[in-house]
Image: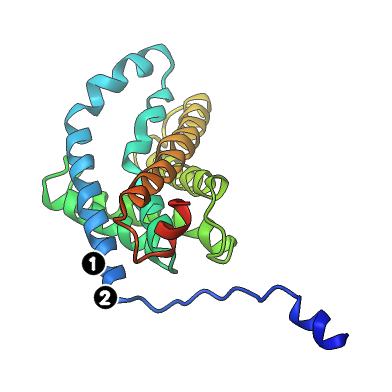
Amino acid sequence: MNATATSSRPTARRIDPRWRVVDIVVASVLGVASALVFFAWNQVYAPVTAPLEAVLPGSQALFYGLWLFAGVLGGLVIRKPGAALFTEIVAAVVSALLGAQWGGFATIEAGLVQGLGAELIFLVFLYHRWNVVVAMLAGAAAGLAMAVNDIVGYYLASGSAFQAIYTVSGILSGAVIAGLGSWFIVRGLARTGALSRFASGRVAAR
């Protein structure tokens, strides 16, 4: 009876922190692809967000999730410690090389901060939970990290109202665009079979 009770207990899941070659390659590809999205968004973000900024200064960050999704996407696909940070940094480096208007250091530093925000959420859940709630929390954390970094770097002299609106907008944008958006992207990729060598592909395709 004791043996039966013991065997019926769920086996504790363990995360394998070791990266395979395919993990590095796919994370790098996701980072480069994300950088191309960043590059396109860099060209049009100012006129797109200007109406929001005019109506409610700080709310322009509602669209800034388009700069945050790389880390969340990499974390959801690779499901290994460091994946979110690695993918976001690759995207930032490539974006800098493509000529991001903020300069190389500022672009890479922003990617580092935003990637750490997303990575922290996956760490909190011990790299075992990958559902839509966790994805949105990771995006929200990346948005919070972005907002704090931007306020310190660019908007420190702005009023508290602007800073609060900018922060809330960044968090919402991160949760919806980067978090929910990445979750849907993973599910879409899984259905094509592109992620068949990853646990994310096998689970999301069900």
Q: Which of 190 and 130 is in front in this view?
A: 190
Where does label 1 land, which residue? 25
Q: Distance between the residues labelled 1 and 2?
A: 6 Å
**Can residue 54 be seen at all in this image of the molecule?**
yes
- Circles 1, 2 touching at the beta carbon (< 8 Å): yes
Q: What x and y, as percent, mark residue 176?
A: 46, 35
Above or below residue 147? Residue 43 is: above
Count of number-bearing discs: 2
Above or below residue 116? Residue 46 is: above
What residue is shown at x 53% (from left), y 30% (from top)? 164
Q: Which amino acid does label 1 sit on?
A: Val
Can you tell which quarter of the image residue 37 is in? top left
Tag 1 secondary structure: helix
Q: Please give the label number shown on residue 21.
A: 2
Graded by Cα atoms within 10 Å as few (under 14), some (14 to 19) or many (20 or more), the crowding at tag 1 reads few
Q: What x and y, as percent, mark residue 15?
A: 52, 74
Q: Nearer the viewer, residue 176 or 43?
A: 176
What residue is shown at x 56% (from left), y 58% (from top)? 129
**Horizontal relation, residue 176 to residue 60: left or right:** right
**Can residue 149 be seen at all in this image of the molecule?**
no
Q: Please give the label number shown on residue 171.
A: none
Above or below residue 194? Residue 46 is: above
Graded by Cα atoms within 10 Å as few (under 14), some (14 to 19) or many (20 or more), the crowding at tag 2 reads few
Q: What x and y, as percent, mark residue 181?
A: 40, 39
Q: Which residue in the rendered view is the most extreme toward the right?
A: 1
Q: Which residue in the rendered view is the most extreme toward the left?
A: 98
Above or below residue 75? Residue 160 is: above
What residue is shown at x 46% (from left), y 45% (from top)? 139
What residue is shown at x 25% (from left), y 28% (from top)? 45
Q: What x and y, as percent, mark residue 203?
A: 48, 57
Q: Which amino acid does label 2 sit on?
A: Val
